[in-house]
Image (cartoon, rainbow, N blue to C red):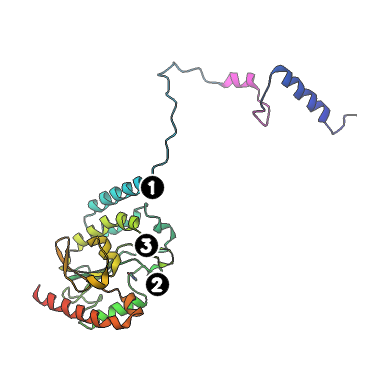
Amino acid sequence: MESGNTYWRDRALLEWQVELGATEAILDAPLDRYALEAVRPAAKPSVTPQTPQTPQPPEPPMQVALNAVVIAGQAAAMAQDLSALATAMEAFDHCELKRGARSFVFSDGNPAARVMIVGEAPGREEDRAGKPFVGRAGQLLDRMFDAIGMGRAQEDPALALYITNVLPWRPPSNRTPDATEIAMMLPFLERHITLADPQVIVLMGNTPCQALLGRTGITRMRGQWTEVLGKPCLPMLHPAYLLRNPIAKRETWADLLDLRARLLTT
Ligand code: URA
């Protein structure tokens, strides 16, 4: 009676194959090469022999980042209005922050406003709400501007605010955006400013100063008027900084009065 154990038979077959010169086991199941021959398509006339493909080394991170900046520049330049810009920006796939964020946060307020505020990036509340500056710092920002009669809900462009950030996606744990993230989103921010065409720009804190002026040091830069894309621009202390350092509200009050005076003469 045939035993269930086929060890000796299998071993004999294997030894026979080794004797015939087989050096490798290639397939798990046997392959009938005669049957294969019958279905094989007729050989194609020979064409130019293919050069073997040399595996390409992965692109260095710097090149990847530079490519992303170029792609962002092209996408931003194609946008002819704010809604097209928001669509292009949301579709931009080269910023890793997009994968960790819950929302794409583009802007809030009145796009016709004379004043455009640029902040850093959404935090937890903004990521939840899909709107910039809605958390504690945002509420302070609203109170600050309310004190000079301005707000994001105002319909009159002279009193209204238009608000955006350097980055539309929340960085993990609210960390400061890095130079690569800023560089690849900058073409979108510049296009955003061009399309909204405000009369005055306010930069809230170091990150928008880094992005648009190429320097930081907000405690020295605040209150010093400068220019961005040919428009008057005022760096101010970020409201999150004011929450941690309430004594600095004095300087911010001076900056708000200066802004109001500037708007009266612009
Ligand atoms: N801080 C910012 O800079 N932007 C926001 O939208 C919220 C907090």
Residue identifier under label 1: 61
Q: Is residue 82 visible?
A: no
Say above or below: 27 vs 213: above
Which quadrant of the render holds ligand 1? bottom left
Which comes before the other along the chain, label 1 or label 3? 1
Locate residue 135 relative to residue 229 in the image: left or right. Answer: right
Which of labels 1 and 3 is toward the front?
Answer: 1
Q: Within 10 Å of the Cα at label 2, are there few (<14), some (14-19), or many (20+) other Cα atoms?
A: some
Q: What residue type is disc 3 on?
A: Trp
Q: CA distance from mark 3 to mark 2?
A: 12 Å
Say above or below: 135 vs 100: below
Q: Magenta segment: does it hold 30?
A: yes
Locate residue 67 relative to residue 5 in the image: left or right. Answer: left
Closest to the observer, 210 or 181: 210
* Residue found at the very far left of the displayed protein: 265
Residue identifier under label 2: 125
Q: Magenta segment: does it hold 49?
A: no
Q: Is residue 208 visible?
A: yes
Q: Which residues are magenta?
A: 25-39
Closest to the observer, 90 or 70: 70
Query: Where does residue 53 sit, x and y in percent of width and height?
Result: 43, 29
Report the disc number at residue 169: 3
Q: What residue type is disc 2 on?
A: Glu
Q: Is mark 2 within 8 Å of ligand 1?
A: yes
Q: CA distance from mark 1 to mark 3?
A: 21 Å
Query: Where does residue 69 sit, x and y in percent of width and height?
Result: 30, 50
Closest to the observer, 170 or 114: 170
Which comes before the other along the chain, label 3 or label 2? 2
Locate residue 63 relative to residue 52 in the image: left or right. Answer: left
